[in-house]
Amino acid sequence: MKALLLAAGRSKRMAPIKDKNFLDFLGKPLIQHQIEFLMENGMKDIVVVGGKHNLAELRELCAKLSKKIVVVEQKNLEIGMRGAILATKKLVFDEPIFIFSGNDVVDKTAMKSIMKAFKSKSAESYLLAKTVDKYFPGGYLKVDKKNIISAIIEKPAIGKEPSNLVNLVLHVHTNPAKLFKYLEKVKDDKSDQYEEMMTAMIHDGVRMAAVPYSGFWQPIKFPWHVVPVFKYLFAQAKKKIAKSAKIAKNAIINGDVIIDEKAVIFDGAVINGPAYIGPNTIVATNALVRESHVGKNCIIGFSTEVARSHLSNDVWTHTNYIGDSVIGNNVSFGSGTVTGNLRLDEGNIHVDIDGNRIDTQTNKFGLICGDNVRVGINTSMMPGVRIGSDSLVGAGIVIPENIPEGSFVRAKWELKICPNKAKIVVGGREEMRKRLKK
């Protein structure tokens, strides 16, 4: 069986995070975790589909992992999954193919379930179907009692779902020649072209089976999906504190942690797991890192708190609060700068993406920051704000809206100086201390 790993997406909904395939988790990019997942589950013949924007990086990474991995380019990214699969046509022969999204994270039971179904030979194609207990805006499967699919219904109205089975991108097709024939028939002006192709196949009598799955599943479609994926991958990883790491005697380590090579934890610092501290990273005196991923070469400076956040590499902080945020590479926060992560009314945080207000489905979410950003002292970021890469943000201001890539942000404010008419009482503070002690 040949595995097709789809990684050509341009991550538009993740902006300013450039390519979610190369987001680091525990010292490895996401796409490497996905390739290793396939290998660990018996997939040795792997084709990775990339785009012009990430092809060189994919080829470099795959060459290090295995000489057997082939990387191909999807030239027309506008036709989505259909274009990705068509890009592999010259590499696929009569063998069954396994199609897997590079951005859908699942557990080992997903592979076991779909391979068991494939071996049963009960259908021509098999689609992994997540059982959901609340509405998800995806493709729902209409099935009979034997889980044979009669229709794929994209984003039905709430309450109109044909089942509780949502189509995931873990598919096995046993007849690739027929699959490519149908793919080539679909018109380029259609949306969801791959789903249109499967609908046509079902209409023509091709037997497709839904394979129910109730295990872990987290697609990375939006930035707020990053931390849940970190926590899942962390739970699967071996917990360790590297021998070359230096941890002060009065630093506090609580729960499960991974502290990588040459990391340094200073006096009075607290690490509350699950937490990953990357190579050469420093967690300074009185700093607190909890439920967070901190990449390599970072400085978590004096009295900084990092909570439920994902920091990439080379992030510098000093007396900051970073909560429920996703931070890119080579980012520096001036002293006193904070990320707001909770609305005054404690309602769900919304993020403006391409002019649309997207509900994060959580009431705690902070900053999304691109690469190569510098922020001055005492600046405050409102919840759900995005700062584009290669930007400078000045000191002492509030950022209530998205900042485009390559911006220099300053605020207009006026310093007013006038005579002081109030009398400053000598010894007033001592009197206040006495009253407080009572």
Image (cartoon, grey):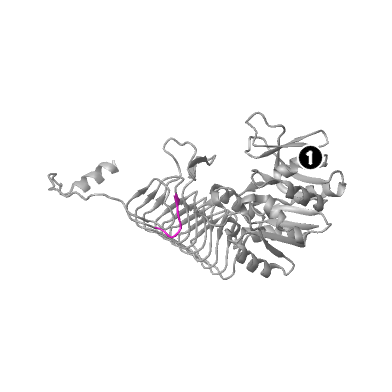
The quadrant holding residue 395 is bottom left
Above/below status of 18 relative to 353: below
**Residue at the (67%, 46%) spot, across then down:** 217
Tag 1, which secondary structure? helix
Above/below status of 150 relative to 5: above
Q: Main secondary structure of the magenta part?
A: loop
Callout count? 1
Spot occupied by residue 382 in the image (x, y as percentages of width and height): 41, 45
**Visible residue check, residue 210:** no
**Residue at the (81%, 38%) spot, across then down:** 148
Q: Nearer the viewer, residue 172 or 191?
A: 191
- Type of amino acid at the residue the image marks with label 1: Ile
Q: Which residue is under mark 1? A: 202
- Farthest residue in the right direction? 121
**Residue at the (54%, 49%) spot, across then down:** 13
**Visible residue check, residue 111:** yes
Q: Which residues are magenta?
A: 386-391
Spot occupied by residue 118 in the image (x, y as percentages of width and height): 83, 49
Please identify the quadrant where the C terminus is shown. top left
The quadrant holding residue 136 is top right
Instruction: Name the side, left or right, on which 365 lies relative to 428.
Output: right
Q: Nearer the viewer, residue 315 or 6?
A: 6
